[in-house]
Image (cartoon, grey):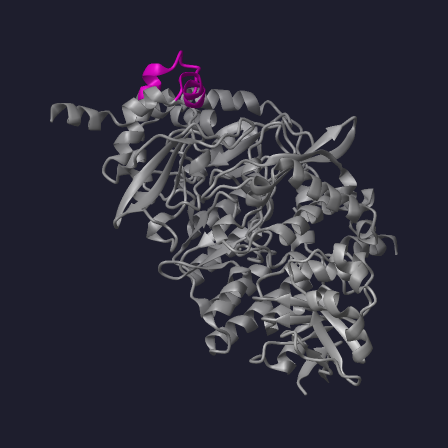
């Protein structure tokens, strides 16, 4: 079983990514399926597996799709190349606007130098590219420990912090 | 001047260490060239012809003496003794060595200077009116808003990997001195019925398809600066094209969608932010703005004296001083004070270049005469914004001794140019030789004064860093079968009358271009209705045809002779 980063720790990956459309659900297994398959086989998938997560292309409008996936325990978002930041907006919207509290997983060209930004945008599960050093990736979550702006990791906006200092 | 607090200092220090580690890994072979490229760009490092170029952000063009002294130090220690001011008010170094850049950045960080997001597909340094706070046409000082937005977009995790670069430009005055509509987003700070707000334009940009920003919202309330900026950036991050680098700017989304759909998308996102918890976090309170405004309060001006008469007397005695006062000194909103332009366009000097000695001199001069501050301008010059009239003559003598008093602001030899083929890895043609040739033709002040205000701008390639698209006379260097050729555009303007110049016709060879520009200017002198009609006014009145005929007249006469 491969290892990933989950909530600041290195953990076993207990989910199977089924991108080819043929992997069949097993009663004991947790399966991540593409949105199209989720839409086509929703009933069968839920009946057959322990848990089903959904993988969204980074071109999808998460606000429009959300009613279909709001009850999922896991949503996976994609980075076809690490400098393509569309999934960062998807993540922020899922966390802040839509209130998604399940696992938010980053897949694809996930390199150590993307990890800090993923953490700030609300990803709590990160699957690094196979050539990346897991421990280095994990520690990259805290590369920069102060922030100017709110995102989806609980940092207060700097103007609010200064406001509080001025009155406190 | 904004002063860093502990939060700002920690953020910059940690960022500097982050890049030090990235550089170390690249040099150790742990990071590929491709992966490192994305990281170094976001720290201001661009691969150039001879060495990496390091772009240092100068937020809204404001510098103080300690920063100038540090610049003098770093260009000596890490470069060849000079820096280059750009149209985006930044400073570029052409010769740093990559292994030394982390140390260089650490030295800059000690004086609140950095290269964060100076290049790359992210939100770039914010530019502003270089006369903010002192211009007599100012409605609202834009600098507090620039700094609030600078902090919001700095290391913003959602907008750190955009489809393409994104530039903000601000003004709070009636006259647009910051070419704001050439930016991806222009913010005009203004008042309506007594309340402060922002007029937003979106979709400007030069380069391959030069376009001017279109109005998105005529009045966003003062509290909503960050909400509206967030709505624009989010819309861009979602919908900007990533399949073609030449079609990735936000202006292409606007063009492909049309303004109605584009505006509706931004306004809808703005409304959604406003009605969510996110909006509550992003909304600025009056105290936030007041706190930021306190950093930009007026300096302790001394009451006016009879010094003004003294200036008049000295100008009568000294024609060189008089010429400088006439061209490089402007009225100040406070009686007894003047705004002084420092020309970085001396003869035989690359436009915008500044030596270590000049950085040091400028540090001394702004300490002695302008409350320790200096501004960089859109036109690649500098400004001492708060000079007492009684100090003008002494200041002029010291500037003159440092070759910083060329009295040519706004004239023919005050050309804008990118570094061109001599330095830049993207350039197709040289710029510096051409500006030198044009300069020599109009070096005499009498010739320049006869021509009057004119904006000659030049870029060494399509990317348009020299703003050729918005020059009255724009020159674009192109490569034709390995030779340098130059296309001419006419009628562009970056200001309130913003316009994209029109291409005249075929390109001119390297040995023809300066003659061609001279013929255009001679044509203007013959065709203008009177001495008060400027080049751009004349062009707008009579159109391109007479200028075109003169630009290519040698070719026609050669053809006729043959």
Q: Main SS of the magenta segment?
A: helix
The question of residue B300 being in magenta is answered with: no
Residue B368: name its quadrant: top right
| Image coordinates for residue B23, horizontal then vertical, percent | 51, 71
Instruction: Look at the image and tell me in which quarter the C terminus of chain A lies.
Output: bottom right
Between A62 and B72, the residue placed more toward the observer is: A62
Task: Specify whether B279 is left or right of B266.
Answer: right
Instruction: Look at the image and tell me in which quarter the N terminus of chain A lies.
Output: bottom right
Q: How many numbered marks appear? A: 0
| Image coordinates for residue B426, horizontal then vertical, percent | 39, 53
Task: Specify whether A5 is left or right of B81.
Answer: right
| Image coordinates for residue B134, horizontal then vertical, percent | 62, 32
Q: Is residue B324 above or below residue A61?
A: above
Residue B160: name its quadrant: bottom right
Residue at position x 64%, y 28% in the image:
B334
Please report the bounds of the magenta region as a residue range. Answer: B523-543
Between A74 and B153, the residue placed more toward the observer is: A74
The question of residue B527 being in magenta is answered with: yes
């Amino acid at each position: 079983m491969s290892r990933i980063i989950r909530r600041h720790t290195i953990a076993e990956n207990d989910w199977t990514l089924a991108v080819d459309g043929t992997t069949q659900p097993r009663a004991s297994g947790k399966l991540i399926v593409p949105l199209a398959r989720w839409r086509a086989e929703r009933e069968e998938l839920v009946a057959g597996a322990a848990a089903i997560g959904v993988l969204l292309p980074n071109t999808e409008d998460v606000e429009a799709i959300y009613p279909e996936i709001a009850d999922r325990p896991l949503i996976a978002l994609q980075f076809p190349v690490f400098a393509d930041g569309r999934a960062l907006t998807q993540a922020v919207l899922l966390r802040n606007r839509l209130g998604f509290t399940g696992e938010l997983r980053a897949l694809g060209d996930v390199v150590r130098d993307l990890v800090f930004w993923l953490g700030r945008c609300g990803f709590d599960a990160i699957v690094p590219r196979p050539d990346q050093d897991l421990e280095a990736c994990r520690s990259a979550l805290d590369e920069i420990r102060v922030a100017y702006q709110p995102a989806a990791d609980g940092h207060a906006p700097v103007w609010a912090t200064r406001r509080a200092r001025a009155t406190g | 001047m904004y002063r860093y607090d502990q939060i700002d200092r920690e953020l910059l220090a940690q960022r500097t260490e982050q890049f030090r580690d990235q550089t170390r890994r690249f040099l150790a072979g742990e990071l590929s060239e491709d992966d490192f490229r994305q990281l170094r760009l976001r720290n201001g490092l661009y691969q150039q012809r001879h060495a990496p170029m390091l772009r240092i952000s100068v937020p809204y063009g404001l510098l103080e003496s300690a920063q100038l002294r540090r610049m003098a130090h770093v260009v000596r220690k890490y470069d060849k003794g000079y820096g280059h001011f750009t149209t985006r008010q930044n400073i570029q170094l052409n010769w740093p060595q990559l292994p030394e850049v982390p140390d260089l950045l650490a030295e800059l960080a000690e004086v609140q200077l950095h290269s964060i997001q100076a290049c790359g597909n992210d939100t770039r340094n914010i530019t502003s009116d270089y006369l903010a706070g002192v211009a007599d046409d100012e409605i609202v000082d834009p600098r507090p808003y620039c700094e609030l937005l600078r902090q919001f977009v700095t290391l913003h995790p959602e907008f750190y990997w955009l489809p393409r670069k994104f530039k903000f430009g601000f003004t709070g005055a009636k006259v647009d001195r910051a070419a704001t509509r050439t930016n991806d987003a222009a913010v005009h700070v203004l008042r309506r019925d007594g309340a402060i707000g922002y007029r937003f334009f979106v979709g400007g940009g030069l380069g391959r398809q030069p376009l001017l920003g279109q109005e998105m919202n005529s009045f966003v309330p003062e509290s909503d600066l960050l909400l509206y900026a967030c709505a624009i950036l989010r819309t861009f991050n979602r919908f900007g094209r990533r399949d073609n680098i030449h079609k990735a700017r936000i202006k292409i989304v606007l063009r492909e969608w049309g303004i109605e759909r584009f505006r509706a998308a931004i306004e809808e996102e703005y409304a959604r932010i406003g009605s969510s918890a996110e909006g509550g976090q992003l909304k600025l309170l009056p105290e936030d703005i007041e706190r930021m405004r306190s950093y930009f309060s007026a300096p302790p001006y001394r009451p006016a004296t009879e010094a003004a008469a003294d200036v008049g007397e000295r100008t009568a005695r000294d024609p060189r001083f008089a010429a400088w006062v006439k061209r490089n000194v402007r009225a100040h909103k406070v009686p007894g004070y003047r705004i002084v332009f420092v020309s970085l366009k001396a003869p035989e000097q690359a436009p915008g270049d500044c030596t270590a000695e000049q950085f040091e001199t400028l540090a001394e001069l702004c300490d002695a005469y302008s409350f320790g501050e200096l501004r960089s301008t859109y036109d690649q010059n500098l400004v001492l914004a708060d000079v007492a009239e009684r100090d003008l003559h002494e200041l002029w003598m010291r500037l003159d001794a440092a070759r910083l008093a060329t009295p040519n602001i706004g004239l023919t030899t005050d050309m804008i140019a990118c570094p061109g083929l001599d330095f830049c890895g993207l350039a197709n043609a040289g710029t510096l030789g051409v500006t030198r040739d044009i300069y020599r033709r109009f070096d005499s002040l009498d010739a320049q004064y006869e021509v009057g205000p004119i904006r000659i701008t030049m870029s060494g390639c399509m990317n348009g860093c020299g703003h050729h698209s918005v020059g009255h006379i724009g020159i674009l260097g192109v490569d034709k079968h390995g030779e340098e050729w130059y296309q001419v555009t006419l009628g562009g303007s970056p200001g309130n009358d913003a316009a994209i110049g029109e291409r005249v016709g075929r390109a001119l060879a390297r040995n023809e271009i300066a003659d061609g520009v001279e013929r255009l200017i001679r044509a203007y002198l013959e065709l203008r209705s009177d001495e008060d009609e400027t080049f751009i006014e004349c062009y707008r009145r009579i159109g391109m045809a007479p200028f075109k005929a003169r630009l290519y007249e040698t070719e026609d006469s050669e053809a006729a002779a043959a």
